[in-house]
Image (cartoon, helix red, strand yellow):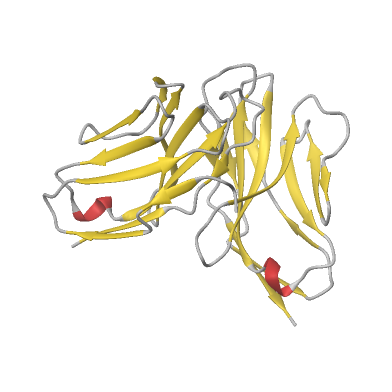
């Protein structure tokens, strides 16, 4: 158990819908990261937050948005869902977000868009 | 830009034997970190081992060791005394050091199967 929690574990929805994925980092970690894992794209970095502020952005679609709240939990919002958004979405956390810090991953949310 | 290449889509090993999973990387950064993660069939990503680019000694964590050859830009994972529970997907990843920007770049992964 990494100490990072993600809910829900599984999500099935329809095209065009909007979903929210939730992540709670390890106790004491200030930085949260979101990754998408799909068969065709592999593991892709989406976005990083540090203590409530956006720190880095990767291959995140405009239909996707995220935020980190004062209690440090984070939410990833996916809207106007398409079939291709079906993937495993991971949240990870680290203490401060420095380059040599290990990122600890949550169990992931498996999203299926029908 | 950083790039990680794992050339072995799948590897097979007999229980109790050692196995090496290959990882080569490409980066223009002077300071970086290399990571290995394990993903069992259940899906979670488990951190295994870390090597800093300026670390002179190869990293070890229990049965895992990282064979780091900086000049060749390789960071191979060695698993000694393989166990059935080691069957999983293994990912090599890297990240620029000395920065607070956190992107991990992953390879495509290697599926390891341990036979009894």
Q: Which residue ends up furthest to the bottom in the rendered image?
A: B116
Above or below residue B19? Residue A74 is: above
Residue A30 visible, this angle: yes
Q: Is residue A90 left or right of residue B54?
A: left
Q: Which residue ends up furthest to the left in the rendered image?
A: A16
The residue located at (81%, 44%) in the rendering is B67
Q: Quadrant of the C terminus of chain A?
A: bottom left
**In terms of image quadrants, where is residue B109?**
bottom right
**In terms of image quadrants, where is residue A101?**
top right
Q: Is residue A58 left or right of residue B32?
A: left
Identify which residue, A99 or B56, lies in the foreground: A99
Q: Position of residue A12 (x, y in %)?
A: 24, 61
Above or below residue A63? Residue A49 is: above
Count of labels in the image: 0
The residue located at (45%, 40%) in the rendering is A24
The residue located at (51%, 66%) in the rendering is B42
The residue located at (41%, 42%) in the rendering is A23
Q: Position of residue A44 (x, y in %)?
A: 43, 41
Q: Quadrant of the N terminus of chain A?
A: bottom right
Q: Is residue B112 left or right of residue A17?
A: right
Residue A89 visible, this angle: no
Above or below residue B106? Residue A47 is: above
Q: Position of residue B103 (x, y in %)?
A: 50, 30
Q: Which residue ends up furthest to the right in the rendered image?
A: B57
Q: Position of residue B29 (x, y in %)?
A: 63, 20
């Amino acid at each position: 158990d990494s100490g990072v929690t993600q809910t829900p574990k599984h999500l099935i929805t329809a095209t065009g819908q909007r979903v929210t994925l939730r992540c709670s980092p390890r106790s004491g970690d200030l930085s949260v990261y979101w990754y998408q894992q799909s068969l065709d794209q592999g593991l892709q970095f989406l976005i990083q937050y540090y203590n409530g502020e956006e720190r880095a952005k990767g291959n995140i679609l405009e239909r996707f948005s995220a935020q980190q709240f004062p209690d440090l939990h984070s939410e990833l919002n996916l809207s106007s869902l398409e079939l291709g958004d079906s993937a495993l979405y991971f949240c990870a956390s680290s203490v401060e977000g420095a380059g040599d810090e290990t990122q600890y991953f949550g169990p992931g949310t498996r999203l299926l868009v029908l | 830009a950083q790039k990680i290449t794992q050339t072995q889509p799948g590897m097979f090993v007999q229980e109790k034997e050692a196995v090496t999973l290959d990882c080569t990387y490409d980066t223009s950064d002077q300071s970086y970190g290399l990571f290995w993660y394990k993903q069992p069939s259940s899906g979670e990503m488990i951190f295994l081992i870390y090597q800093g680019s300026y670390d002179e000694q190869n990293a070890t964590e229990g049965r895992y060791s990282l064979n780091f050859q900086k000049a060749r830009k390789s960071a191979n994972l060695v698993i000694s005394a393989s166990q059935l529970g080691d069957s999983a997907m293994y990912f090599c990843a890297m990240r620029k050091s000395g920065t607070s920007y956190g992107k991990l770049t992953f390879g495509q992964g290697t599926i390891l199967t341990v036979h009894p």
